[in-house]
Image (tube, rainbow, N blue to C red):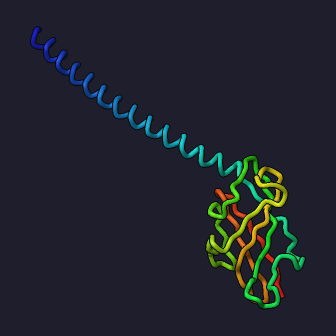
């Protein structure tokens, strides 16, 4: 009988050690998963709070200025911050493509029309130094996950 008790005690201790090891591994994994979800939710919140609208009139002649062929071709778009957070006026925070071609940030200028801070409800002027051929054009502006498309005809 004493032999059975010792065997049962050894099996019980082994089971407790295995359970403690499994519990420790689970706690570590749950903590890592929780941290990952917190980080991801912050990124998602930033994307949700960011919203822009291109309010330029595609039918107006004010979108593209070829300045009589002096080499200073400029696309000018009015972009309104319709999100809940203040956006940066640094062109490094924008990704712009014109007709599928990526525009270098050195070819972008962004300035707030009324003031210096691009707050909710304010409009910024985006100037893109890019020559265009006659025809239909598509511009895509992306910032913090928000993507806006502007299509117009030049000619």
Q: Quadrant of residue 26?
A: top left
Residue at 83 percent across and 61 percent down: it is: 113
* Numbered disc total: 0
Residue 109: image x %, image y %?
A: 71, 68
Residue at 73 percent across and 47 percent down: it is: 85
Residue 47 drawn above or below residue 148: above
Q: Quadrant of residue 70?
A: bottom right
Residue 70 drawn above or below residue 56: below
Residue at 32 percent across and 31 percent down: it is: 22
Give the residue furthest to the right: 60
| Closer-to-camera residue (35/8) | 35
Residue at 75 percent across and 68 percent down: it is: 126
| Closer-to-camera residue (64/13) | 64
Q: Quadrant of the C terminus?
A: bottom right
Residue 118: image x %, image y %?
A: 76, 54
Residue 10 drawn above or below residue 155: above
Residue 144: image x %, image y %?
A: 65, 56
106 relative position to 34: left or right: right
Give the residue furthest to the top: 1
| Closer-to-camera residue (127/120) | 127
Q: Quadrant of residue 59?
A: bottom right
Residue 31: image x %, image y %?
A: 44, 35
Residue 60 drawn above or below residue 54: below
103 relative position to 81: left or right: left
21 relative position to 73: left or right: left
Q: Quadrant of the N terminus?
A: top left
């Amino acid at each position: 009988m004493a032999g059975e008790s010792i065997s049962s005690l050894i099996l019980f201790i082994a089971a407790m050690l295995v359970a403690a090891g499994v519990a420790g591994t689970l706690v570590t994994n749950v903590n890592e998963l929780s941290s990952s979800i917190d980080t991801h939710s912050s990124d998602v919140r930033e994307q949700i709070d960011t919203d822009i609208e291109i309010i330029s009139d595609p039918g107006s002649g004010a979108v593209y200025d070829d300045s009589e062929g002096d080499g200073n071709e400029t696309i000018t778009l009015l972009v309104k911050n319709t999100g809940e957070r203040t956006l940066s006026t640094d062109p490094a925070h924008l990704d712009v493509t014109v007709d599928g071609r990526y525009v270098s940030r050195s070819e972008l200028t962004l300035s707030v029309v009324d003031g210096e801070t691009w707050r909710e409800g304010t409009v910024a002027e985006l100037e893109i130094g890019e020559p265009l051929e006659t025809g239909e054009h598509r511009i895509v502006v992306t910032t913090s996950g928000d993507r806006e498309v502007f299509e117009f005809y030049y000619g």
